[in-house]
Image: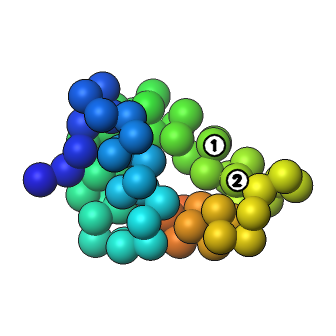
Amino acid sequence: MAVDPRENLEKFWETLLGRDPEKIRALWKVLEAQEQESVRTHLERMAFEDGWTVSQRLSAHTALEAIKD
């Protein structure tokens, strides 16, 4: 079962950045369109902007790959 970000934000991000594409896609499906857009925007910042660690960037790239249409 996917984690609802409205119930446990820490677990939500842990799952989203956990590099498990299957879990990432399951989590993505519970989000509404507006939430998906906000999360995608944040992941793109993490993946492509300065200031994030290599591990964070890799996790963001993995998540973006898992959720791309």
Residue visible at 24% across and 37% down in the picture: 4
Residue 20, horizontal then vertical, whole percent: 36, 73
Question: In this image, 69 relative to 29: left or right?
Answer: right
Residue at 36% x, 72% y is 21
Q: Nearer the viewer, residue 12 or 40?
A: 12
Q: Which residue is mark 1?
A: 42
Looking at the image, residue 17 sits to the left or right of residue 24; the answer is right
- Secondary structure beneath dot 1 equals helix
Q: Is residue 30 left or right of residue 64?
A: left
> Can residue 68 be seen by looking at this rendering?
no
Question: Which residue is farthest right?
Answer: 50
User: Taking 46 as reference, is 30 above or below it?
Assistant: above
- Residue 46's label in the rendered image is 2
- Mark 2: secondary structure: helix
Q: Quadrant of residue 67?
A: bottom left
Residue found at x 44% / y 47%: 13
Given contact means CB atoms under 8 Å apart, are the residues at marks 1 and 2 in contact?
yes
- The answer to whether 29 is drawn above or below residue 33 in the figure is below
For the view shown, which residue lies furthest in the left direction?
1
Could you tell me how far apart the alpha carbons at marks 1 and 2 are, in whole angstroms? 6 Å
Q: Is residue 37 or residue 54 the one in the foreground? A: 54
Q: Is residue 60 visible?
A: yes
Disc 1 residue type (three-letter): His
The residue carrying pointer 1 sits among few (fewer than 14), some (14 to 19) or many (20 or more) residues within 10 Å by Cα, namely: few
- Packing grade of label 2 (10 A; few <14, some 14-19, many >=20) is many
- Looking at the picture, which amino acid does disc 2 mark? Met
Q: Position of residue 24 (x, y in %)?
A: 35, 61
